[in-house]
Image (cartoon, rainbow, N blue to C red):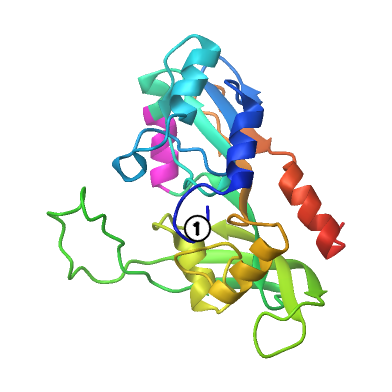
């Protein structure tokens, strides 16, 4: 997504490249997980009336059966998206999401150097939607929000993004322990390690640098999802291969 909230050319290329099919990462008789590219909505939304492709409808057409969402990924976030093949299966897994029993791992590119392992416990005020949350209380206290994060790799680019002649970045793994709206993006903003490409909570100078270098979009990737299968009672771990746009960024950063 660009600063105006519209799809970037790279977002459009990703969506057009998949045509009418989504890459299936896991499937059994109850659940199916796919890779959702950045820029693709999970379902129809009033805030993106111009959109014509939606992961939910695409997967229904692809499988030839109705599917039910059990969680969501923001439009600019790419990665593992899990859906159920029945309303009962959706309900059973949604309960695990609601009780924070589903393991979620994200990769993000952030400004500055992040090293070591950390646990951030920083409550967040509920983010209200202008249309759907008009009746909600605006004076509710901040809610508990906990994120574990680890610095994986660092890079220094020979380009200025402010008063310094170079710019420093980190590849960070994050595991949200709670499920607040935009939790990872808001927590990284709180730490001043803004996620690159975040047009709401990010740093505009670094976002512009990445766009100028040809790496637009939000650099947040849901690369792993794990849960206990409600029917098989087995631990299921779904890993998503590194997307091509991320591979190109790794080359720029000289990351492994």
Q: Is residue 76 left or right of residue 133?
A: right
Compared to residue 143, the image places residue 64 above or below, namely above
Residue at image position (52%, 49%) is 76
Name the spot of residue 228 as percent of width and height, x first: 55, 35
Q: Residue 35's image quarter?
A: top right
Q: Nearer the viewer, residue 155 or 26?
A: 155
Residue positioned most to the top: 64
* Above or below, 123 relative to 133: below
Which region is colored magenta? 91-99
Specify the principal SS of the magenta part. Answer: helix
Which residue is label 1 attached to? 177
Taking depth in this image into account, of 77 and 7 the one nearest to the observer is: 7
- Count of numbered tags: 1
Residue 117, image quadrant: bottom right
Residue 63 appears at what percent x and percent y? 54, 13
Q: Residue at x 70, y 75 (%)?
A: 114
197 sits left or right of 248 in the view: left
Q: Is residue 116 above or below residue 81?
A: below
Taking the image as drawn, is residue 224 in sight?
yes
Q: Residue furthest left?
A: 135
- Horizontal and vertical percent for residue 87? 36, 21
Callout 1 secondary element: loop
Q: Residues within 10 Å of mark 1 (few under 14, many from 20)?
A: many
Q: Within the magenta stretch, is there residue 121? A: no
Query: Where on the picture, by quarter, is residue 124?
Result: bottom left
Quadrant where the C terminus sits is: bottom right
Percent of width and height locating residue 240: 69, 39
- Can residue 115 be seen? no
Between residues 129 and 190, which one lies in front from this camera angle?
Answer: 129
């Amino acid at each position: 997504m660009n600063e105006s909230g519209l799809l970037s050319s790279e977002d459009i290329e990703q969506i057009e490249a998949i045509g009418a099919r989504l890459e299936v990462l896991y499937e059994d008789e109850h659940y199916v997980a796919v890779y959702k590219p950045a820029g693709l909505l999970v379902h129809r939304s009033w805030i993106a009336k111009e959109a014509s492709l939606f992961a939910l409808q695409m997967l229904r057409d692809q499988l030839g059966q109705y599917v039910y969402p059990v969680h969501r990924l923001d439009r600019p976030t790419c990665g593992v998206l899990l859906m159920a093949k029945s309303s009962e299966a959706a309900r059973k897994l949604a309960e695990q999401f609601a009780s924070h029993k589903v393991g979620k791992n994200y990769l993000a590119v952030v400004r500055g150097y992040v090293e070591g392992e950390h646990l951030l416990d920083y409550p967040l005020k509920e983010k209200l939607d202008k249309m759907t949350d008009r009746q909600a209380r605006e004076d509710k206290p901040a809610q508990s929000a906990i994120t574990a994060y680890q610095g994986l790799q660092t890079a220094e680019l020979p380009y200025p993004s402010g008063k310094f002649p170079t710019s420093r970045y980190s590849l960070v793994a994050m595991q949200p322990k709670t499920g607040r709206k935009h939790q990872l993006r808001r927590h990284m903003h709180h730490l001043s390690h803004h996620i690159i490409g975040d047009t709401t909570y990010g740093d505009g100078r670094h976002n512009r640098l990445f766009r100028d270098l040809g790496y637009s979009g939000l650099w947040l990737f849901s690369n792993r999802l794990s849960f206990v299968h409600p029917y098989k009672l087995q631990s299921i771990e779904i890993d998503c291969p590194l997307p091509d746009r991320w591979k190109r960024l790794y080359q720029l950063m000289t990351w492994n």
